[in-house]
Image (spheres, rainbow, N blue to C red):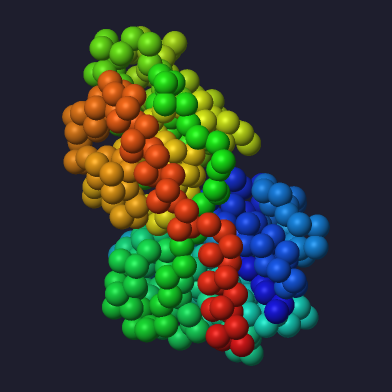
Amino acid sequence: MKILLTELGNAVNAQGGIEKVICNMANAFTKRGHEVAIMVFDKREGGMAFPLDNRVKFLNPGAGNRISRTWVNILNIFRKGKWNKEAAQHRHLTNKMAKVIAPVINELKPDIIIGHDLKSAIIFNDYIVERAPYISLFHFSPEITLENPNFRSCFKNVNGIVVLLPSFVQRVQNMTHNNNVFVIPNIVPQYDEVADYSAKTIVNVARIERKSKRQMDIVEAFNKLQKDFLDWHVEFWGDTNFDKTYFAELQQKVQEYGLQDKIIFGGKTDKVSAKLKQASVFAFPSEYEGFPLAMTEAMSMGLPAVGYKTCSAVNEIIKDGENGYLCDFTVDSLTDKLRQLMQDEDLRRKLGTQAKKDMQQYDENKIWDEWEKLGRKFL
């Protein structure tokens, strides 16, 4: 198959979960004998941040192409409603992008297109008439991906929609009126190593972000715990530039509590597995997720995870009291669950061992087999 993977946003050198999935997918399909191309639309020069098989074709028709938003921003002054303004801006951008992208796709002639973002869905629905079968992958919960009701119709006529968890299927069908919805989870690395359950380390791997990742909850919880656990510390690993204001607030709070020697902000790292192996608890207070790559990778290393029972995906992957803990959406509840794990090494080992077993269902060979099967269905 000739497969085109698209993410028509600022993907150059980006180290997010979507970019990681795209690169993993491209490499896997290539190794299985398929001809693969990745298309982004980024005004910056460069490539993907994650390793790519040298046989994967990388296309960026947006390089050096700055699209002006002046007129749409002026017209938005007269439009009512947040969703209408956002829709107008997206339509303006995708209209401009489509004129550049369409000739590239016509020349490439892919057998199937797998889109990883909203802009791709809009363009392939509204602007490209003659095209290959199109599958849209939802990286987040339906309520996040389809938050703006103006865009739901873009998915009505796509050939297939892939979601990451079974609970998303009915919700997506109801919101898009498209019944071709399939469940294929993300892959999870399978580690031979196991976490160090004697380590006095809580770890969190995620970009520093106020809206969804909520690292402040961990800082507040650890402040309540540190007097009883003087030999413990917290490590945060992830992009600190995504939400600089929030990062500054976190640093200020750490200083206010006098925890500079106990809480480490390590920034980006390409040694995630090593950081996980040196910890014994994974704290993940996200408010919403689609399929938490960092958390599942930690669980595959044998780390018991603590997350909010109100967080989509997290509340399906963590089995409360079996492979980790689900807590109420409060700092006090998070504190209580962390305390239980911090004070009992045997408990950490028991829950972590089960977490490692549970992640085996996301082995890469199983997941790529499902993707190949779906691709052939639409050929």
Residue 36 appears at what percent x and percent y?
A: 72, 69
Q: Is residue 206 visible?
A: no
Left or right of 291 on screen, residue 344? left
Q: How many marks?
A: 0
Give above or below for 225 relative to 267: above
The residue that appears at 77% across and 65% down in the rendered structure is 57
Residue 250 appears at what percent x and percent y?
A: 39, 25
The residue that appears at 42% across and 63% down in the rendered structure is 164
Residue 52 appears at what percent x and percent y?
A: 73, 54
239 or 24: which is nearer to us? 24
Q: Residue furthest right?
A: 54
Locate the C terminus and report the quarter of the image it occupies.
bottom right
Left or right of 16 on screen, residue 54? right
The residue that appears at 70% across and 79% down in the rendered structure is 1
Q: Name which quarter of the figure residue 192 lies in.
A: top right
Left or right of 313 on screen, residue 376? right
The residue that appears at 42% across and 70% down in the rendered structure is 183
Left or right of 132 on screen, residue 214? left
Q: Residue furthest bottom?
A: 130
Q: Name which quarter of the figure residue 203 lies in.
A: top left
Give above or below for 356 relative to 107: above
240 or 193: which is nearer to us? 193
322 or 4: which is nearer to us? 322
